[in-house]
Image (spheres, grey):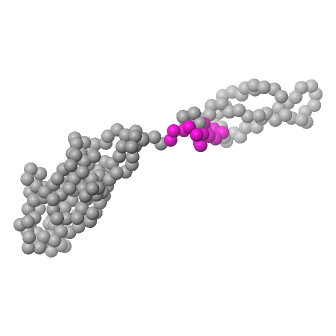
Amino acid sequence: MSTKEIGLPIDLTLGIHNGTEIRDGKLQLKQVATDTSGKSIYAAKGSWESSVISIGDKVTAFQRVVKTMVGTGSNVDYKIYTKSSTNNVDWSEYVEITYLDGKINSPVGLYARIKIELSSTPMPALLTLDEFTDGKYDTDFISSSDGVLKLRRTLTTSLSLDTEASGNGYITRLHFQKSKYKKINSIVIADSP
């Protein structure tokens, strides 16, 4: 995973994080999960916006943004923007910096803010939701004890003997609740009492 940091005297822990976090002093996309193999899964995109930076009489010091890139792969992209204000009330729009030399393209002002947007291309991850081996989802209609969650296709139930019937032989009964079944394909009586 790629991490980013800027070489301005600003505290990356301050400001507004949206899908980003600080890890080892560097700005990176937020870790949202861990896959089955223990590999970290990060947010697909995120941004960080600094608190107001008071430039004061050091306007000339705020000419460039210095960045250090760590572990940038082909699946990571970043954009750095700045905006400025002369009174901390009226702000210019965010403008992207010139990456070749880090030049700030915002108008000169006494106050500044920095915004960094990070994005990455999703990478394959192995996620196991459940192994379905302990039967915890077993019901009359669902089976989950053999490693697969599936509908039960064959239901076994006991017939009740009708003791009030007279004559030779016997009568058994079985009641189905129609609301519990979408359809019944067949009824097979395997054993007789």
Residue 171, position as x, y percentages in the image: 85, 30
Residue at left 35%, top 46%? Answer: 40
Please indicate, yes or no, whether residue 46 appears anywhere in the rendered image.
Answer: no
Residue 59, position as x, y percentages in the image: 8, 68
By secondary structure, the bulk of the magenta-drawn segment is best described as loop
Range of residues picked out in magenta: 130-143
Residue at left 27%, top 63%? Answer: 13
Q: Viewed as shown, does residue 28 lie left or right of 189?
A: left
Residue 63, position as x, y percentages in the image: 8, 62
Residue 110 occupies quadrant:
bottom left
Please indicate, yes or no, whether residue 157 appears anywhere in the rendered image.
Answer: yes
Name the one closer to the observer, 154 or 25.
25
For the C terminus, the image quarter is top right
Q: Is residue 142 magenta?
A: yes
Name above or below for residue 129 compared with residue 58. Answer: above
Name above or below for residue 41 compared with residue 58. Answer: above
Name the one closer to the observer, 161 or 76.
76
What is the count of numbered marks?
Answer: 0
Residue 43, position as x, y percentages in the image: 33, 50
Farthest residue in the front direction?
24
Q: Viewed as shown, does residue 4 lie left or right of 102?
A: right
